[in-house]
Image (cartoon, helix red, strand yellow):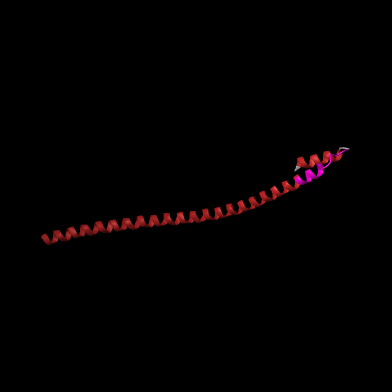
Amino acid sequence: FRELIEILAISRNQKLPQPGEESQILELLIQRDGEFQELMKLAVDQGKIYHEMQLLEKVVEKRDSDIQQLQKQLKEAEHILATAVYQAKEKLKSIEKARKG
């Protein structure tokens, strides 16, 4: 935009502007403005997508935390069950000894 404005300023300072030059510059400015508007729309869309990604990352982190907590509880349950099974086997052994005795 700056270059186009400089060219426009230079052409106005010239005593004999070339025919059609100002209209070409104006058309170029309009074209650049359209490109700029498209880029701004794209930037807004990308900002929305980035915001959605951040929200999804928070959901994923929460789910990961939930999964880790469940894994911890399962390990604790596994340990309790393993201990109970071991104690039950020991009790069965002592019952068998008592019957034999």
Image vertical order of residue 24 relative to residue 89, above or below: above
Residue 76 place in picture, x, y as percent: 35, 56
Residue extending furthest toward the front: 19
Nearer to me, 8 or 96: 8
| Closer to the camera in the image, 69 or 92 | 69
Lateral position of residue 34 relative to residue 83, left or right: right
Instruction: Give the quadrant of the N terminus.
Output: top right
26 drawn magenta: yes
Q: Does the magenta-highlighted stretch encompass residue 24?
A: yes
- Residue drawn at (42%, 56%) of the image: 69
**Residue 92 picture location, percent across and down:** 19, 60
Q: Is residue 46 above or below residue 9?
A: below
Residue lying farthest to the left in this orientation? 101
Q: Is residue 17 above or below residue 49?
A: above
Spot occupied by residue 28 in the image (x, y as percentages of width and height): 75, 44
| Extent of the magenta region | 16-27
Q: Residue at x 12, y 62 (%)?
A: 99
Q: Along the horizontal axis of the image, is 57 left or right of 70?
A: right
Q: Position of residue 24 (x, y in %)?
A: 78, 43
